Image (spheres, rainbow, N blue to C red):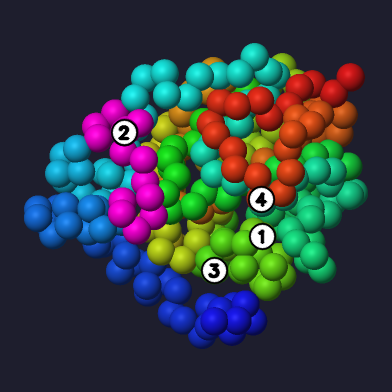
Amino acid sequence: MSERFAVLLQYLLPKQALTALAGRFAAARAGGLTTAVIRWFVGRYGVNMAEADNPDIAGYASFNEFFTRPLQPGARPLAAADFTCPVDGAISQFGAILRDQIFQAKGHAYSTTALVGGDAALAAQFEDGSFATLYLSPKDYHRIHMPCAGRLLRMIHVPGDLFSVNPVTARGVPGLFARNERVVCVFESAHGPFVMVLVGATIVGSMATVWHGVVNPPRPGHLREWRYEERQLVFRQGEEMGRFLLGSTVVMLFPKSTLEFDAGWAPQRPIRLGEHMGDRAI
């Protein structure tokens, strides 16, 4: 199938209905059927169950329970770095934000204001800053962790489309990550403010954070916001902050002169939770 046709097909598919159906199935506790589907998925995508806290495929009551499985203690040691990688996956893109424009793929960019749900004042903090877009494939560990220690200030649920977020779609759908449904998490840290955006996709049944639980559904069709300035929700570097119930993409924003990326980083390079992402820019 050509890339152009694959992208066109996504415009035609009933993505919301497919996602809702997938979400119901993933949450179902169907006994042997659930185990059979998990076994097929592990074989199809090459999931490494040896590093899971529970490697027994039959030990998961639902597909969601399997998909968000924890790792064995010590499976992802933290590098000695100011910023560590928050997920297992691959680098989609990373680098400098050009004024307010984030590079998506050749010929495509989108604005920080659009990404964070239209809040121009929030987006302005990252003008000429840096970004990283990290893609989680089906085989990956799907919990999201903190790249550095931080205190939660806000969470914004932005309604949107549910296109796939794989590399083919990123090359073919303009403004993909600012079009899809997403959860914007705003933190402050010793290095300054930073944002972690959990981007939904086709078949992504929901996204959850450790402080709120499942954010979506519901999907009311309008922007929702929660403020946490009056609470002390502080997370350590490497601590879990959220998860995808069927996987997707994380986009991170940092202010100007904050982060110098690891010299070994490159687009499409595989990454692992806890590895060296970068250090404070000098």
Callout 1 crowding tier (Cα within 10 Å): few <14, some 14–19, many ≥20 = many
Asked whether, in this view, residue 30 is left or right of residue 232, the answer is left
Q: CA distance from mark 4 to mark 2?
A: 25 Å
Residues 36 and 170: in front is 36
The magenta-colored residue range is 42-55
According to the picture, the residue beneath numbered tag 3 turns out to be 163
Considering only order in the chain, which callout, 4 or 1, is on the residue closer to the N terminus? 1
Mark nearest the camera among 1 and 2 is 2
Mark nearest the camera among 3 and 2 is 2
Considering only order in the chain, which callout, 2 or 1, is on the residue closer to the N terminus? 2
User: Which kind of residue does numbered mark 4 sit on?
Assistant: Gln
Q: Is residue 176 above or below residue 69?
A: below
Question: For residue 178, which numbered disc appears in the image?
Answer: 1
Marks 3 and 1: CB-CB under 8 Å?
no
The quarter of the displayed image where residue 188 is located:
top right
Considering only order in the chain, which callout, 2 or 4, is on the residue closer to the N terminus? 2
Considering only order in the chain, which callout, 1 or 3, is on the residue closer to the N terminus? 3
Marks 1 and 4: CB-CB under 8 Å?
no
Considering only order in the chain, which callout, 4 or 3, is on the residue closer to the N terminus? 3
Helix, strand or loop at disc 1? helix
